[in-house]
Amino acid sequence: MTVPSRDRLVTLVPAVFLVLQSIAALFFLGDALADLRREPMAAETLLEQLVALALICGIGLSAWHLRQSLDRLRAQERALAAARGELARTIDTQFDSWGLTPAERDVGFLALKGLDVADIAAMRGAAQGTVRAQLTRIYAKAGVSGRAQFAAWFVEDLLHDGVRPAE
Amino acid sequence: MRPDADDGGAVAPPDPWDPVVRLTHWAVVIAVLVNYFIAKPGGTIHVWVGWALMAVLALRFLWGLVGPHEARFSAFPPDPRATLSHLADLLRGRAREHRSHNPAGAMMVYTLWALLVAVSLTGLVMTGGKSPVTIAEEKAAVAAGDWSVLVNDDGGDHDEGGNSDFAEEIHEVAANLIIMLAALHVAGVALESRLLKRSLVRPMIRGSRPR
């Protein structure tokens, strides 16, 4: 899986500006220093020094900001990976305790991912009837009524228990 | 379709390079190639590119202090002993993953940076520290018939004639070394990519590693 392109742009665009800012700032600084040598106390020279200083501070600040967004993105990525691993482990253990066969595990995972019978059959190169029979056996072993309950088995613990009855 | 149960807890392979590292890397590559092979030495474009290179280097050095872990100097300290053992490993056809630059790569980075700084500084000496903007202004003045800037310029050059020659010498030697080391760097990346069985170039371009 690659980083989504939006996340990529969030850090790439500021980085591009950072490079452009640096180049612009250095050219401006070179010009300002040349003027400083020529006429140190002229109003224009002083203004140029101020602008150069502001540019450089701006670059430092942008760099710091970019660093923080990079850190944030990485932390999110890590948390997501950890959550994925955790969920995968939970599912694995549960499948073990239900005593699913290897074929049933595969079908079970695909069903959890939201694929329908036709898709699963196509992916596994099996007949739809076979997949349907496997799913039925899985539901029976898990003691659930159907796919909705099967999927709910793994998410219900993640949800708050604030389920309110309809009024 | 069995999900890998270790997916979440496993130690991640080297993190991708962040955009600042990638942009500054390729900006330096372009600047070096343009100034070495294309731009006329001492010409206006050569000076413009040189100044842009200095800015990019300055940004990279700033990033080496405030950037993410892999980009910081502290993640790849120059370590001659580790470099030698790393090179010995390479000769034996072994390579280990490193989060940032590997020890040999780090040495290469610092050497190239030192040479790039040397090239920039000697370039500044050779042009009398004049910014490309000033140079362009002077050229425009000369073109408009005002030769006085040239007179001043000559006077200044005479004072530090010896200095300038010396600077020119270093400028050329450093430039040649940069090109040679860059070629070695590319060879090193190719060798290491083969040993690690993953492209080291891809993360420097795309920023993400294949998973």
Image: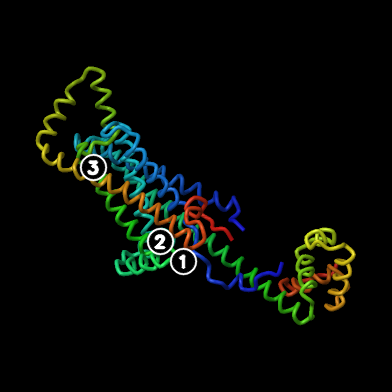
For the residues labelled 1 and 2, the Cα–Cα distance comes to 9 Å
Question: In what element is the residue under mark 3?
Answer: helix
Visible residue check, residue A40: no
Q: Are marks 2 and 3 on the same chain?
A: yes
Crowding at mark 1 (Cα within 10 Å: few <14, some 14-19, many 20+): few
Q: CA distance from mark 2 to mark 3?
A: 28 Å
- What x and y, as percent, mark residue B12? 53, 67
Q: Which residue is mark 1?
A: B97
Question: Which subunit holds the residue at mark 1?
Answer: B
Residue A30 at x, y = what percent?
Answer: 28, 39
Query: Which residue has dot 3 on it?
Result: B172
- Discs 2/3, front: 3
Q: Is residue A38 visible?
A: yes
* A18 sits left or right of B2 in the view: left
**Tag 1, which secondary structure?**
loop
Q: Earlier in the sequence, mark 2 or mark 3?
A: 2
Question: Tag 2, which chain?
Answer: B
* Residue of label 2: B101
Indicate the chain on which mark 3 is placed: B
A42 vs A15, left or right, is left
Mark 2, residues whose alpha carbon is within 10 Å: few (<14), some, or many (≥20)? Answer: some
